[in-house]
């Protein structure tokens, strides 16, 4: 599986997919999510069959009483890893650090992170034992308010599955997948 942020249009995704195939990397299944941002999209290439698609392209949040739309949307997919074994993938690309006249970019990122966390919570409420992977470009550090919002707290807190050599903070082995 390959999740892409800053993807161009559908034609660019299909060209990339074809180029990868000529190099021996075949991704027969794909998803392309277009949202408010007309130039930059979220996409997924997968070797695993996509059995359900829930693109989130019309999500909003309030910031200082003003309504903002999540600019790039979120790809939510169920992938069939084996018979009777699915994995839910949530791919995101949060607000960049580029300043905008409308609001502080960190506050916009936090607003988008809250929407993403709401999708995570909704999925886990629907299926408490869901195998859930949340990934993408969060455009922030691990200690930021936006990242902490996505990770969450308590029983539904997410954890980092990267090897300890990749992460700055060591984790107990029992928490790794």
Image: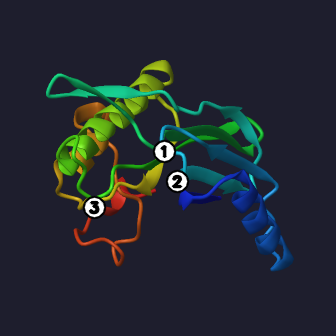
| 1 or 3: tag closer to the N-terminus | 1
Label 3 environment density (alpha carbons within 10 Å; few <14, some 14–19, many ≥20): few
Q: Earlier in the sequence, mark 3 or mark 2?
A: 2
Q: Is residue 85 left or right of residue 156?
A: right
Q: Residues within 10 Å of mark 1 (few under 14, many from 20)?
A: few
- Pinpoint residue 174: horizontal percent, then vertical percent: 35, 56
Mark 1 and mark 2 in contact? Answer it, CB < 8 Å.
yes
Left or right of 131, for residue 158: left
Q: Which residue is mark 3?
A: 172
Which secondary structure, mark 3? loop
Say if 120 sits above or below 19 in the image: above
Q: Observer-nearest residue: 46 or 80?
A: 46
**Which residue is denoted by mark 1 in the rendering?**
37
Real-space CA distance between mark 1 and mark 2, rounded to the nearest whole angstrom: 6 Å
| Residue 118 appears left or right of 154 | right
**Disc 2 target residue:** 40
Residue shown at the point (79%, 73%) measured from the top left: 19
Q: Of circles 1 and 3, which is in front?
A: 1
- Label 2 near label 3: C-beta < 8 Å? no
Q: Position of residue 126 (x, y in %)?
A: 49, 19
Cα distance in 3D space between marks 1 and 3:
39 Å
């Amino acid at each position: 599986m390959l999740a892409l942020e800053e993807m161009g249009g559908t034609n660019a995704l299909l060209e990339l997919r074809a180029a990868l195939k000529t190099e021996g990397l075949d991704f027969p299944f794909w998803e392309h999510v277009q949202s408010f941002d007309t130039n930059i999209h979220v996409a997924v290439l997968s070797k695993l069959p996509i059995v359900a698609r829930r693109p989130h392209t019309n999500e909003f949040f309030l910031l200082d009483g003003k309504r903002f739309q999540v600019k790039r949307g979120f790809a939510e997919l169920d992938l069939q890893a084996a018979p009777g074994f699915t994995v839910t993938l949530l791919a995101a690309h949060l607000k960049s650090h580029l300043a905008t006249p409308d609001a502080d970019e960190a506050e916009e990122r936090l607003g988008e992170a809250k929407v993403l966390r709401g999708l995570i919570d909704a999925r886990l409420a629907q299926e408490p034992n869901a195998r859930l992977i949340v990934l993408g470009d969060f455009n922030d550090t691990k200690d930021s308010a936006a990242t902490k919002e996505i990770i969450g707290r308590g029983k539904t807190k997410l954890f980092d599955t990267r090897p300890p050599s990749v992460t700055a903070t060591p984790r107990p082995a029992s928490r790794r997948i």
